[in-house]
Amino acid sequence: MLNILTGLPKNKNNDNDICKKFANSIGCKIILGSSTMKMYCRELNIQPDIKIISATKSPRYFINGIDIASEGVITLNECYKLLSGKNSDNTSAIEVVKLIKKEYEINFIVGTADNGQHLFYKQNNLLPRTEIIKKIIDLLKGKEITTEFI
């Protein structure tokens, strides 16, 4: 089982319940999104180890109990490129896609809060979180997918 948490819940009152549920989920755990990582660590009182390798690479977050944690929308768009057969040098996306290809059951928990980055996404030809998740899921035929938009 692969569990992917990305994005903040629309209702901030749900932060703690969502983080506890995710922490207690069975299988591999991935957090994609800086704000998502901050919420998770804040709600569960965890201190992350943040590594920024270079200005052109996505930051990596090392969190006890989490297999991969990185930036969100850029990484998800790069995952889509890789799953579509294109190349990417985004190391986080490469690692996430390896796990997506390996696992049969994938659980997406997708926050729907507005992060105000629409202009940035448009300027950089990036699809917003909910749209890119739907496109990724369309490519995952033959897998058991559950998706919870929160």
Image: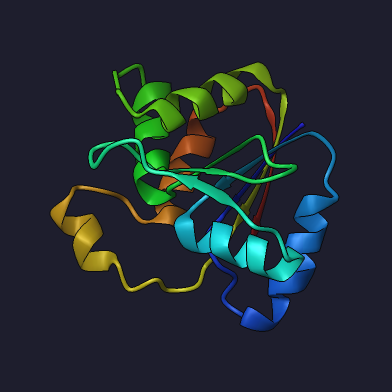
Q: Residue at x 43, y 30 (%)?
A: 93
Residue 68, by quadrant, is: top right
Q: Is residue 64 visible?
A: yes
The correct choice, above or below, for 43 with respect to 20 in the image is below
Q: Position of residue 45 (x, y in %)?
A: 73, 66
Q: In this orientation, which residue lies closer to the viewer: 112 or 66?
A: 66
The quarter in which the C terminus is drawn is: bottom right
Residue 73 position within the rendered picture, expressed as x and y whole percent measured from the top left: 39, 50
Q: Which residue is located at x 85 percent, y 50 percent?
A: 24
* 14 on left or right of 138: right
Q: Is residue 28 above or below residue 83?
A: below
Quarter of the image containing the N terminus?
top right
Question: x and y percent of residue 35 in the render?
Answer: 49, 63
Front in this rendered view, residue 98 or 64: 64
Q: Give percent across and percent down for residue 108.
A: 64, 47
Residue 150 in view in this figure: no
In this view of the protein, which residue sits in the foreground, 42 or 149? Answer: 42
120 relative position to 94: left or right: left
